[in-house]
Image (tube, rainbow, N blue to C red):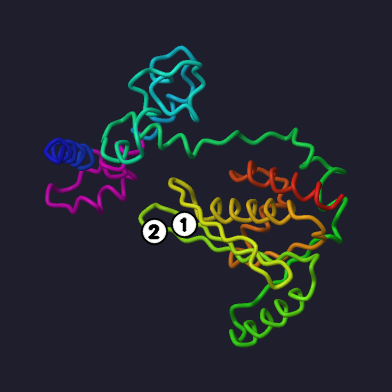
Amino acid sequence: MSYHLKILGKMQRRATIWILGAFKTSLLFGIKAIVGLILIKLHLQKLGRRSQLQAHSLPPNHLIQSLIDSSHSISTTQHPTSLDFLTRYQQFLIKSHLVDMNNRFNGIFPSFTPFYSELSPGHRIIDNFSDHFVFNLHSKQKDNRAHAHQLDNMVIKVSSSSSTAIVVTNASIKNDIVTLILHMHIHDNPIAKIVYHMVHVTSTEAELFTMRCSINQASNHNNISKIIIVTDSIHAARKIFDPFLHPFQVHSVAILTELQQFFL
């Protein structure tokens, strides 16, 4: 593969020099930046990812639909050699376009639609329940000790209430693997500790998913009238109430649906 990439890189260099009329001794990265060309390796990666996503639009009777994981497939029958019949370790060992395509499907979500009732004027959370939620912001310019003292006082206050759930969430990304964790306490008692691992997602999407799980877990407990979420990603929390086009709408709508049922 490296040999073929080297040949393609030489071809791209010659084309770039021809476009600019530059000297043959010109630096490759410099002339590519001037022309506006990306590295051939990155261009091939982009084409490969697009080809993987194209398989999602194949008809149900297509062979590929019967070979991928049933959770992503729209086919009614699975092939005997389908990925469904392999263990996770076996799938990890296999290096093929089919496995990469199957993993890429984890990042496909329904597109934006203006017909969600949760986003329509008059039905939105901010229209009907504007006094039911609040953001308590902390400025990074302030003393962290004062902020820690504020959090301690809040936890002590809500610990005496059996109708308040406090959830602490966090998300981190390492080697394209996202680790999500949430701790939920009610009346000074640990109720749940949940850890998720995800791939091919952004940090904002991961934070929104964690908040979605937090609200779902807390609202399923009886006699809970107040939910407090402690997070270091306030920009992700604000996406919940954003009615305009953004790529995280599927999580926003799910959270808004949960909150409307909780507020009623």
The stretch in magenta equals: 19-47
* Depth order, front residue of 171/30: 171
- Tell me the chief SS of the magenta region: helix
Q: Which residue shows up at 65% across the image and 43% down it?
A: 245
| Residue at the image position 39 percent from the left and 52 percent from the top | 176
Say whether residue 23 is magenta: yes
- Quadrant where the N terminus sits is top left
Which residue lies under the disc numbered 2? 174
x and y percentages locating residue 124 in the rendered image: 81, 46
Q: Does the stretch in magenta take in 183?
A: no
* Residue under pointer 1: 179
Compare marks 2 and 1 and give the one earlier in the sequence.
2
User: What residue appears at the point 41 percent right and 53 percent down from the top-left corner?
Assistant: 177
Q: Position of residue 85 (x, y in %)?
A: 37, 28
Q: In the rendered view, does 234 fall on the left or right side of 39?
A: right
Does residue 256 appear in this view? Answer: yes
